[in-house]
Amino acid sequence: MSDWDFLHSMHDEGYSPEQIAEAAACGYNPWEHDNWDSIEEFVDDDEDWDCDEEPKNPTTLELWELLDDLIRTAQNYLELTGRHLPIYGELGELYGEAKYGIKRHKPFTQGSDGKLGKDFVEIKTISPHKSDNTVLVKRAGNFNRLLIVKISVDFKFKSKMIDRKSLRKGSGKHFKAKWSE
């Protein structure tokens, strides 16, 4: 079993999404301990533990360097395995943070991905293997602007920032935003 296969096994064994997210964030393998309810009960309070800390404030240069490293990793993974690494959403958000200065929220924050000035921003990514150029966005989301990041097959990035009020009106839980609009 690989280092991350246990996350799929956790789902099959009935662990909650929160427990799976905690395990993924902290690299914790739950069946190494009996009666696992939460990672917190196994954390030594004396350790320097920052899993629940506020996000760091990296410099723009650090963000671009990290993005470049992650892109190379995704490219290498695709070349070696013929599979896409499931990282495109994170790449899109990191690109938005580096290019636009969006301050991202803590992980798993509902409603939007970050703030740009006083505006809440939702970031959606069109990955290289996606067959169409649309993104699905929750209408209930708490955002004023939508950033669509498009990643090409050769890992080139383009983006569009759209005001929410210019998006189509309608009913239903989601709306589709097209790259061409």
Image (spheres, rainbow, N blue to C red):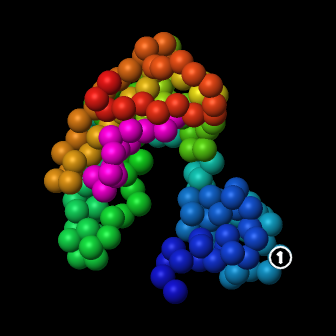
Q: Which residue occupies the extreme right position in the image?
A: 35
Q: Is mark 1 on a helix, strand or loop?
A: loop
> What is the x, y in percent for residue 112?
55, 31
Asked whether 134 falls inside the magenta stretch, the response is yes
Residue 48: which quarter of the image?
Answer: bottom right
> Which stretch is magenta?
125-138
Quick check: 128 left or right of 143? Answer: left
> What is the x, y in percent for residue 11?
67, 70
Asked whether 99 or 166 is in front, the reply is 166
Residue depicted at x 39% and y 56%: 87
- The image shows a total of numbered marks equal to 1
Q: Would you say residue 63 is visible in this rendering? A: no
Residue 27: which quarter of the image?
Answer: bottom right
Q: Which residue occupies the extreme bottom position in the image?
A: 1
171 in relation to 95, above or below: above
* Amino acid of disc 1: Asn
Q: Quadrant of the C terminus?
A: top left
> What is the x, y in percent for residue 78?
26, 68
Quick check: 42 left or right of 174? Answer: right
171 in relation to 40, above or below: above
Asked whether 58 or 102 is in front, the reply is 102
Q: Would you say residue 102 is visible in this rendering? A: yes
Residue depicted at x 42% and y 30%: 177
- Residue highlighted by disc 1: 35
> What is the x, y in percent for residue 81?
28, 76
The local crowd at label 1, few if under 14, some if 14 to 19, many if 20 or more residues have their Cα within 10 Å, is few
Quick check: 162 left or right of 72? Answer: right
Residue depicted at x 47% and y 33%: 176
Residue depicted at x 23% and y 76%: 80
76 in relation to 110, above or below: below
